[in-house]
Amino acid sequence: MQIKRRSVLVGAALTPAVATLGSGRAAADPGTDDTGEFLVGVGISDATGPVAEIGMMGYSSFEQRAEGLHQRTRARAFVFAESGGAQRVVYVCADVCMIFQSVHDAVLTRLAQVYGDLYTERNVMLTAVHSHAACGGASHDYAYNLAVLGHNPQVFDAEVGGIVEAITAAHDSLAPGSLSYGRSELTDASVNRSRIAFDRNPAEDRDYYPFGIDTSMRVLRITQGGRDVGAINWFPTHGASLTDTNHLISGDNKGAAAYFWEHDHAGVRYLDGTPQFVAAFPQTNTGDMSPNLDLRPGRGPTDDEFENTRIIGQRQVEAARTAWASASENLTGGVDSRIMYLDMANQEVGGEFTPDGRTYRTSPACIGAAMSAGSTEDGPAIPIFPEGTTNPLVDALGGMDAPIPQWLQDAQAPKLVLVAVGLLPPDGWVPHVLKIQILRIGGLYVVGGPAEFTIVAGLRIRRTVADRLGVPLENVIFQGYANSYASYCTTPQEYDAQQYEGGSTLFGRYTLPAYQQGFATLADALRTGGDVPRGPAPRDLSQFQPYFGPRVEHDEPPAGHAFGDILTQPASKTTPGQQVTVEFVTGHPHNNPRRGGTFLEIQRLSGDRWIRHADDGDWSTRYHWTRTEPHRSVARITWDIPDETPAGQYRVQHYGDSRDAAGTITPFTGTSNDFDVE
């Protein structure tokens, strides 16, 4: 079956207010001069929070609490400016589960302190890869903190700090550059986990996605001074290759993909100074796209969740590099942006955007029975507490009991409403005033929405924006998980099926039409050069943010031991393909998450010096932390020796921090015996 859509951008003439693509000039090769059409900058920073005894974000499982680190989570930033530098936009992709309004607002506050009104809510777009293995607790929205037992300041500070540092690095690296766009097909990295709902859509939607999945890998190739410095690679598949039984912090398949391109292909070593290449793998309309190809958690392509993460990540890299290598449509013109805030709990939606042409209204957020049941393909959802269970955060907030008036049940039909989270005090437990945004980068338009949009929901918004702008559909990229988070967004037809995604569409059947209406207004303003009112201000719940998770009182080594002592030594000889395991007496990772550093090094002897061969940001290493007694803990470091590892003499070094009874934190180092890799 032929896929019915354009495979390349089209350089159609647009109105004067809208930039065109260029003449199709080939992307810059190394050594050629850029035209100076844009100033471009790229940056990256560590955004990893504490990696032990915190709830993990994504599955909302009380049992999924972090016990170490697989790979560090990072923020990647891109600044695009007109050649004079007056107009600019910022795009960020972070290896976290969601960008919450709390993080968005804090990032903008810190940017304003440094840059004044240069970077604002209007021209900054923050997005997440939606890893279900990320740290939880950054939100100020109570519903998203339930399973992680409240707001965790360490997680919040790590995400905000990492994003701001990445933007700062991109700002500092601004220089003349050029942008080109490419596209490829990827058919074996996703599956539609809600085909019953998808099939309810009209034929024109289903025909656009003949396989029931969005197969487009869309790549923005970024060069600076004739040298490739970055790539943004949009493709929709859930960050859920790792299941809720995993307890190691990770960027999941998207974080893995970024690492494989940056480290394996571009030679980036994150602790060796400024990376020379930054590759982001953001989501698009991912709501019904699962990486679990066998439609079971952790199943497909294999039965090993880490191997699945690697394979799905590598497949995205291969497709992205294909699109990147063939990118020949040069972007020309300036940059621009528009935003507005919508009160999604009370939007009147005109008939232009509703299925039957009548006017409807959205309603306060409600959790449906299908949402509580979760996705059988990917894992559980936000828990609804049965009688007899307790949660200290719920108790502190006064419980979850809220009457469900008949008018609200009618407004949310056919959803079976379990909890009216939008009516819970003080102002709902999920956000309802939400930012929508369009960035223009030359002739490319990135449309950011604050939810998990299904592929058809994203398609309809793209069509709306493309029609209003008068540009080809392929010039418009939909970006989910942008700037805030309000669960899912399905089409009205999908909503009626009340699958997991429909039960998670908080504001009722006409959520998508309300977003479409808002994006149409933004697109009209971009086309004409006009502006739109900002809309209502998002609420601020920062004043009362309790946390009930475990805290570190102090650390104690076992009798006869000191921090950093070895409990398990490595074998004296090993070979590629084998695993090295070393255990150390350690302190709690909360004492110092070592953001921008590492908990471990695999060191190789070079002459008379030990040099770092791998660290805790590498795919081949894992850092496991275990509490053995109330104040004692063990660090188990493993290294799966890659096939290409050179023969030589190696050792494992652990970096930790201990806290004494007075609260003083002291760093320590432990070093294993040497061992030979033959």
Image: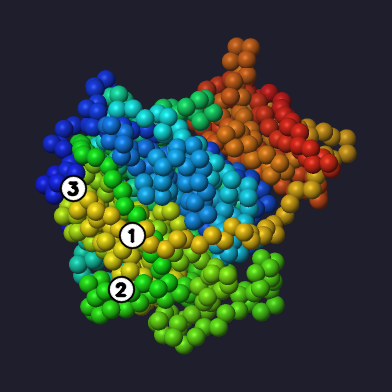
Nearer to us of marks 2 and 3 is: 3
The residue lying furthest to the top in this view is 607
Amino acid under disc 2: Val
- Image coordinates of residue 321 in percent, x first then y, are 31, 37
Q: Is residue 158 left or right of residue 169?
A: right
For marks 3 and 1, give the one nearer the viewer.
1
Q: Where does label 1 land, which residue?
A: 533
Name the amino acid type tagged 3: Ala
Which of the marked residues, 3 or 1, is nearer the chain's N terminus?
Answer: 3
Residue 10, x across and y down, in percent? 15, 46
Return the mark for residue 51.
none
Which badge, 2 or 1, comes first in the chain's sequence? 2
Task: Choose between 339 and 64: the one closer to the eye.
Answer: 339
Q: CA distance from mark 2 to mark 3?
A: 27 Å
Q: Is residue 510 left or right of residue 647?
A: left
Callout 3 crowding tier (Cα within 10 Å): few <14, some 14–19, many ≥20: some
Asked if residue 565 is positioned above or below residue 121 in the image, the reply reads above
The amino acid on which the numbered mark 1 sits, given as a three-letter code, is: Pro
Label 2 environment density (alpha carbons within 10 Å; few <14, some 14–19, many ≥20): many
User: Of tags 2 and 1, which is closer to the observer?
Assistant: 1
Residue behind mark 2: 349
Q: Secondary structure at mark 3?
A: loop
The disc placed on residue 17 is 3
Q: Are marks 2 and 3 in contact (CB under 8 Å)?
A: no
Q: Secondary structure at mark 2?
A: strand
The alpha-carbon separation of the residues under discs 2 and 1 comes to 17 Å
Q: Is residue 176 visible?
A: yes
Q: Write down the quadrant of residue 520 in the picture.
A: bottom left
Q: Nearer the viewer, residue 480 or 183?
A: 480
